[in-house]
Image (cartoon, rainbow, N blue to C red):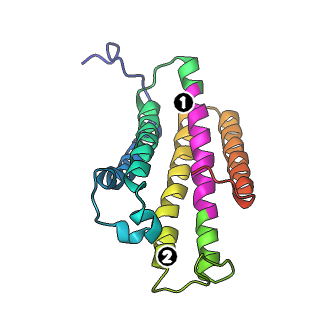
Amino acid sequence: MNSNLSSKPSQSKSTVWAGGAVFVWSIAYMLPHLYWALGGRIGVSLLKPGVAASSQFELINWISLPIFIVAGLVGLGFIYLGKSKILRLLLLSVTVLGCSIATAHGIFGIIYRGLQIASVIGLENGTFDIHDDMYVVWDMVIFEPWFLIEGILLAIAGWCFLKGARSRKVWLGVCVVGTIVGLVTGMLGVRFA
């Protein structure tokens, strides 16, 4: 096929890999939520017992599915987006927002859960007990790192998408500032995810 006839814009290999990684990572995390939304029960023991037993559990998972789908589509946007400046700006805006929220969520959550395990911060039932509060460990080693990695992948995808050194420096600066804002709001008790 003649490359001039292809409707797909040429992207660097790093942009394709980064966009693909965002897509795969997002959809992979979506699958257990889809399973739980459909009533599946495998893996709910990793979650806080009150959450898994909640009558809202399936609804919460249904609500989270579009977020994961949008994150996956953002990854594909880096691969298949046309040359429209408006679409590129929209893609980068959504990406920096997602990067900031996911990265701050992951960092805050890992530190917060670590402090709970160290009994610096108490839990609802007092101090951390490995037998009663294993969900805290699972949250720290599975769920929070997922957010952190998602944020990092989004930052990398945006960085690869941009071509100029100055644009890339500005991109990283905006991602860092957004993450700091997310961390500060987390410390103030406002968490976006």
Q: Quadrant of the N terminus?
A: top left
Q: Which residue is mark 1?
A: 91
- Which quadrant of the view contains residue 52? bottom left
Chain-order first, disc 2 or disc 1 = 1
Where residue 110 appears, as percent x and y from the top left, is: 58, 68
Q: Position of residue 193 (x, y in %)?
A: 56, 51
How crowded is the residue under tag 2: few (<14 C-alpha within 10 Å), some, or many (20+)?
A: some
User: Magenta residues, as a range?
Assistant: 90-108
Q: Quadrant of residue 7?
A: top left
Q: Is residue 193 magenta?
A: no
Residue 6 to residue 178: above or below: above
Q: Magenta region, mostly helix, strand or loop? A: helix
Q: Any magenta on residue 93?
A: yes
Pick the residue in front: 96 or 82.
96
Amino acid type, callout 2: Val
C-alpha distance separating marks 2 and 1: 34 Å
What residue sits 55% from the left and 25% below the top? 88
As shown in the figure, which amino acid type bears the numbered disc 1?
Leu
Horizontal and vertical percent position of residue 109:
59, 64
Q: In this view of the protein, which residue sits in the foreground, 133 or 14?
A: 133
Is any part of residue 23 visible from this angle? yes
Residue hosting label 2 = 137
Depth order, front residue of 2/45: 45
Above/below status of 139 relative to 88: below
Quarter of the rendering containing residue 105: bottom right
Q: In the picture provided, is 93 more to the left or to the right than 10?
A: right
